[in-house]
Amino acid sequence: MEQDIQSVLYSEAQLRERVQELGRQITEDYRDRDLILVCVLKGSCVFMADLMRAIRVNAAIDFMCVSSYGAGTSTRGAVQLIKDLGTDVAGKDVLLVEDILDSGVTLSFLRDHIIRSRGPASFGICTLFDKPERRRVDVQPDYVGFVIPDAFIVGYGLDYAERYRNLPYVGILKPEVYS
């Protein structure tokens, strides 16, 4: 795995520090509120596990799973809902936790789906990585870990063809691996 990484973008320590900062900010913003954290599977699972431990308010959790990439490196433009929420979020504060926001297609779909069909009191987005250069749909996250360049990254839950998720850091994948 390591031989496929061009360079480390964020170390394990940098990720840990930023997730703690996000947890403090979310704790302050959602103090005394009924928060539900929704993890977008599979890429966000590592981030979500660390983030929820950094949040110091009562928070329920749930999971959603969508597919828009397949085994490729960019969205196909069509989002398929694989697993919907199992929790009733009507009248509650929902914070969608995502690994990376690039085109905005997936998050726009999830935002519209949850707001339209589930009726939360509020809806927010927390993304660990934001790639604004690739945005095709207007989606503005409420919490951002890092704004990153247009590079293909893996590790800390992010994958290419279901590989590299278990790297403890985030690295830029060598182009020859996915081209």
Image (tube, helix red, strand yellow):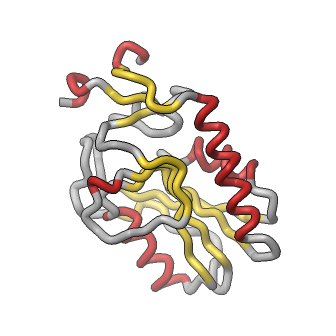
Say which of 86 and 24 sits in front: 24
Numbered disc total: 0
Q: Residue furthest top?
A: 3
Q: Locate the N terminus and report the quarter of the image it occupies.
A: top left
Q: Residue furthest left?
A: 179
Say which of 132 and 153 sits in front: 132
Q: Is residue 81 left or right of residue 25?
A: left
Q: Position of residue 136 (x, y in %)?
A: 25, 64
Say whether residue 42 is visible: no
What is the quadrant of residue 13 in the picture? top right
Please determine whether, in this image, residue 151 is positioned above or below residue 51: above
Residue at image location 41% in from the left, 65% down from the top: 107
Please determine whether, in this image, residue 39 is positioned above or below residue 28: above
Q: Position of residue 119 (x, y in %)?
A: 56, 86
Say whether residue 138 is visible: yes
Residue at image location 71% in from the left, 69% down from the top: 29
Q: Position of residue 3 (x, y in %)?
A: 37, 13
Q: Locate the C terminus and report the quarter of the image it occupies.
A: top left
Q: Is residue 127 left or right of residue 16?
A: left
What is the quadrant of residue 137 in the picture? bottom left
Q: Is residue 58 left or right of residue 93?
A: right
Q: Position of residue 154 (x, y in %)?
A: 41, 34
